[in-house]
Amino acid sequence: MIQLKDYIKIYPNILKSEICKKIITQPGLSFDSAPVLDASSSTEQYNTERKCYIKTLDKQFNQFLYDAIGTILLSYQAEFKYFYTGLSCEDTGYEHLLYKGEEQGEYKTHTDHFDLYPRVLSCSFILNENYDGGDFSFFEGEYIVKKEAGSAVIFPSNFCFPHAVTPVSNGDRHAIITWIH
């Protein structure tokens, strides 16, 4: 019998370590002037707090991520025969997230559903693993994704998949996020 966590897939080594390092250290990238974002979902009862910095990813990395998303979608579709993205499938673009350990960066439990532009799948690329805390957690901590630089986590964006990033306690956590709609 399929369980909800079976729809959460981890794709290891989807990004090469050199690409991850280049994204983290890209010239001119400064999170210092970016505000810490407070995020709230589209429903009142799920107001949550996100303590992280966000920058739009430099366009030089778009093709690497676009290719990775294509590979992931083919694998996901092959595994789940009823999953279908439709003819107008596309991602939302790529955002680089920084969770600073010195600020206990985190994103409390939330879902990724968004009424205005419905999201089908959520995808997070893990760029580094040299930090403490910052666990990608599902179902109030019942399922924790192992940190592995270069891997991607993909899962349905709907209400059945509440997830969080626990507070980072040491070092900085870098990730790239996008959604398939």
Image (spheres, rainbow, N blue to C red):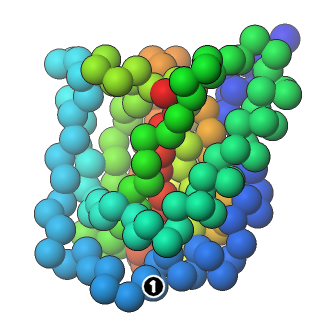
Quarter of the figure with residue 8: top right
Q: Nearer the viewer, residue 163 or 92?
A: 92
Q: Nearer the viewer, residue 165 or 174?
A: 174
Q: Is residue 127 above or below residue 86?
A: below
User: Split into 4 quadrants, where in the image is the N terminus?
Assistant: top right
Q: Is residue 164 above or below residue 152?
A: above
Quarter of the figure with residue 111: top left
Report which residue position mark 1 lands on.
25
Measured from the top left, where is residue 4 in percent x and y?
67, 20
Q: Residue at x 85, y 28 (%)?
A: 78
Mark 1 residue crowding within 10 angstroms, few (<14) / some (14–19) / many (20+): few
Quarter of the figure with residue 36: bottom left
Q: Tally the numbered discs.
A: 1
Q: Nearer the viewer, residue 157 or 47?
A: 157
Q: Is residue 42 left or right of residue 164?
A: left
Whether residue 114 can be seen here: yes
Q: Amino acid at mark 1?
A: Thr
Residue lying furthest front in this view? 87
Residue lying furthest bottom in this view? 27
Q: Residue at x 19, y 78 (%)?
A: 32
Q: Is residue 152 above or below residue 181?
A: below
Measured from the top left, where is residue 41 in percent x and y?
26, 28
Q: Residue at x 33, y 42 (%)?
A: 108
Q: Residue at x 28, y 20 (%)?
A: 116
Q: Is residue 112 above or below residue 38?
A: above
Whether residue 146 can be seen here: no
Element class at badge 1: loop
Q: Nearer the viewer, residue 138 or 16?
A: 16
Measured from the top left, where is residue 29 in percent x and y?
32, 80
